[in-house]
Amino acid sequence: METLTVTDQKINLVEGEFTASEASFVVSALIDEKINFHKLQRLSWCEGDQFADTCYPDGRIKELMDEKEIAREFIKNMRQSGAKFQIKGELTISLAE
């Protein structure tokens, strides 16, 4: 009898229609969580080695902060129109190769 091994999973993290305020909150909260993850990662790496190479988390933090600002500006510019925002975010987890 064969057993199937699941090697990936999809999680519907966010999906829906949001007002400008809601969209801004959702996007900011998601990005902030990822920024905090990288800050903790960087701190962890530096605990035992003050000269640890933190280029990756430093770079990701900068990228995420830039993306957060771009999203904030986009939502701000569209707020005047009273438009609703559609946000879809699927998280895919799979085994690393």
Image (cartoon, rainbow, N blue to C red):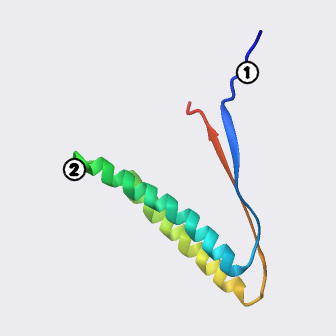
Q: In the rendered view, would you say 79 is above or below 27?
A: below
Point out residue 65 in the picture as x, y percentages from the top left corner: 48, 68
Task: Return the residue at label 1.
Answer: 4
Q: Earlier in the sequence, mark 2 or mark 1?
A: 1
* Location of residue 61 with respect to 94 vertically, above or below: below
Pointer 1 local density, CA inside 10 Å: few below 14, some 14–19, many at least 20: few
User: Can residue 53 be seen?
Assistant: no
| Numbered label attached to residue 51 | 2
Q: Is residue 46 left or right of residue 62?
A: left
As shown in the figure, which amino acid type bears the numbered disc 2?
Phe
Position of 42 compared to 19: left or right? Answer: left
Name the residue type under label 1: Leu
Quadrant where the C terminus sits is top right
> What residue appears at the point 40 percent right and 52 percent down from the top-left corner?
56
13 above or below 8?
below
Q: Nearer the viewer, mark 2 or mark 1?
A: 1
The answer to whether any part of residue 6 appears in the image is yes
Residue at image coords 59%, 33%: 95
Which residue shows up at 63% across the image and 75% down it?
24
